[in-house]
Each structure stands twice: as structure tokens, then as C-alpha cells.
Amino acid sequence: MRSLILAGLGLSALVATPASAQVQQTNPNAANQSMEAGSQMRALRQEQTTQSDMLRMDVQRNQAATPAPNTGPNALPPGSGTGVIGR
């Protein structure tokens, strides 16, 4: 019974800290490598977000720059021309 309680306490201590943040005796650079990997993932995510935002802005800019169709009283329906070329 006593060994079960001690084992349970040991497991709760391991669960409380992430495995990647624990210092490993066999690899003293494990924490640095883990932080580096996290940093690289954040940089890639930021780059992806920036590209997505730029694409969205380009689409919005192109939509805003598209002229509205002429619907005034002198508008000609598509395909109907005056028959006059070069004026």
C-alpha cells in the first residue's frame, strides 16, 4: 500500500511538468533544443499568418479597384455596339 502511494506521488510530479521541459542527464541541451523547436514552429506559424493576411489584402484591394458596371440611362447592354469603329 505504501509503495502505491509513493508511486502515485511520483507520477503526479511527472505529470505536473511537461516532458520536453525536464532536464535529461544524457542530453544537457534537451531544454535548449526543445525551446528552439518551439521557436521555429512559432516563426513558421507567423510567416504563414503574414502570407495569408497579405493575400487577403490583395484580394480586397482588387475587389475595391474593380469599377462598378455602368447602369445609367446611356448604358448599352453587353454585345450591342454602335457599329462605328475607330471613333
Image (cartoon, helix red, strand yellow):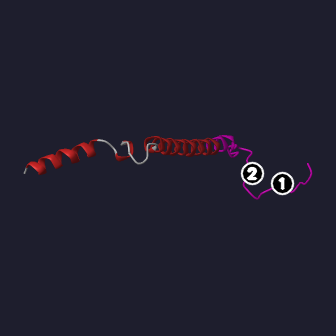
Is residue 39 located in the magenta-colored stretch of the structure? no
Residue beneath label 2, please?
Answer: 76
Majority secondary structure of magenta residues: loop
Circles 1 and 2 in contact, beta carbons < 8 Å: yes
Q: Is residue 27 left or right of residue 43?
A: left
Amino acid at the residue labelled 1: Thr
What residue span does the magenta drawing correspond to?
60-87
The answer to which of 30 and 73 lies nearer the viewer is: 30
Q: Secondary structure at mark 1?
A: loop
Residue 24 screen position, x and y as percent? 38, 45
Residue sitting at x 22%, y 48%:
11
Residue 44 screen position, x and y as percent? 55, 45
Amino acid at the residue labelled 2: Leu
Residue sitting at x 43%, y 47%:
27
Residue sitting at x 7%, y 51%:
1
**Placement of 84 over or under 32, stated as above or below:** below
**Counting residues from the N terminus, which is met first, the one under dot 1 or under dot 2?**
2
The answer to which of 43 and 16 lies nearer the viewer is: 16
Residue sitting at x 74%, y 45%:
74
Q: Is residue 27 left or right of residue 45?
A: left
Q: Quadrant of residue 17?
A: top left
Residue beneath label 1, please?
Answer: 82
Q: Quadrant of residue 70?
A: top right
Q: Is residue 12 left or right of residue 43?
A: left
